[in-house]
Amino acid sequence: MLRFYALQAKDGDCLVLEYGKSDNPKFMLIDGGPAQVYPNFLKPFLEDLSSHGGKLETILTSHVDDDHIHGLLDLMAEVEKQKGNQEEPIIQIENLWHNTFENTLGAGTDIATKMNAVFGASSQSNKVLVNTDMAINSINQGNKLRRYAKLIKIPINSLFEHDIITVDEYPDPIKMDNLSLQIVGPTQDNLEKLKDEWLEWLEENEDKLAGEDAQLAAYADKSAPNLSSIMILITNQDNDRTLLLTGDGRGDFLIDGLEMQNLLDENGACHVDCLKIPHHGSNRNVTPKFFEKVKADNYVISGAGKHGNPEPDTLSWIVKAAHKDERKIKIYVTNETDGTKELRRNYSEDEYGYQLITMDKEDYYFSLDL
């Protein structure tokens, strides 16, 4: 059994895997969405799960962006409070998988120090940047998550020999009950590239961000490099169906990881049953070529229109790549947005052979059986 839940996470990600045996299911939580996702959507889901005897075998933090980690901090804070009051926690948590900034982009660099200094120098730049996944507060949130886990005695990366989860460190599949998990990102080479991009970006924008020019600050916000995401190919060993989790990873980095793990065919492409689209459908993370190389039957996008996500470009690239191959696909979105409306206007579902499925406003999650 493998069931994939996408919870209503507004502009972020909050995902759950149910796996194992139907009479004894196990659960993994991937990310927790931004503010208000925990009380409104994740908490009710976990309360229902716990009432049926379920627990979280694993919490996976794909990366330290507020729109992925905020809900996890809310969960940890509630569990810490309940344990302090000698109450039964909302749910039992067995493990946390988490790459710290210090072990990835911060390793051997002074990026975090420079970011704190630069972003703290200007109230205007911080005001603009704090609402993005590039802000320094997201890195601090990652450190806070780790402190919570230690405080309430949740093991961190206990399944791993090393304190960093990369393709290089874990080239072999990881077995979890009926699942096989293959790390496909980040690679050490990708981390080194991101380090160089961050250092270059900070050097170029240090003077701009130290000033009070809102336009320059906004420009810097749009041009900042991405943070690093853990990306995993999950295979249901009962039926060989596959799910590719991408966080906010870059498409080129994902293809590098797939190639490093020998998961691309002779044409440099691969096919999965379900692809979680990177970065909420941002066109900054993918290209038309990406969707010609990484193909799926089902595409899942969590986004609510912030920063234009999911972008009309991204949606059209998915549809045109599938149409070119004469593949019938389904695109699942958590919210109707300007981008989804534009896709329907410009690319007929009947003509292009796709289905666009939007989460019902009365629901707070949808699920796919894989």
Image (tube, rainbow, N blue to C red):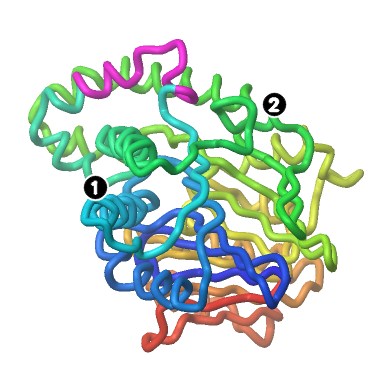
- Front residue of 37/56: it is 56
Say if 305 sits above or below 256 in the image: below
Residue depicted at 16% across the width and 34% down the height: 125
**Mark 2 surroundings: few (<14), some (14-19) or many (≥20) residues within 10 A:** some
| Residue at the extreme right of the image, as rendered | 266
Structural distance between the alpha carbons of marks 2 and 1: 32 Å
Disc on the earlier residue, 2 or 1:
1
Q: In this view, does 336 lie to the left or right of 369?
A: left
Q: In this view, does 120 lie to the left or right of 237?
A: left
Residue depicted at 71% across the width and 63% down the height: 321
Residue linked to disc 2: 168
Say if 29 sits above or below 185 in the image: below
- Front residue of 211/115: it is 115
Residue 32 placed where, x, y %? 39, 57
Residue linked to disc 1: 131
| Residue at the extreme front of the image, as rendered | 86
Q: Does the magenta stretch include residue 283?
A: no
Residue type, numbered disc 1: Asn
Residue depicted at 76% across the width and 57% down the height: 235
Q: Does the magenta stretch include residue 116?
A: yes
Say if 267 sits above or below 242 in the image: above
Identify the magenta region.
103-117
- Front residue of 176/184: it is 176
Determine the secondary structure under disc 1: loop
Residue type, numbered disc 2: Asp
**Mark 1 surroundings: few (<14), some (14-19) or many (≥20) residues within 10 A:** some
Residue 265 placed where, x, y %? 88, 46
Q: Quadrant of the N terminus?
A: bottom right
Q: Is residue 160 left or right of residue 174?
A: left
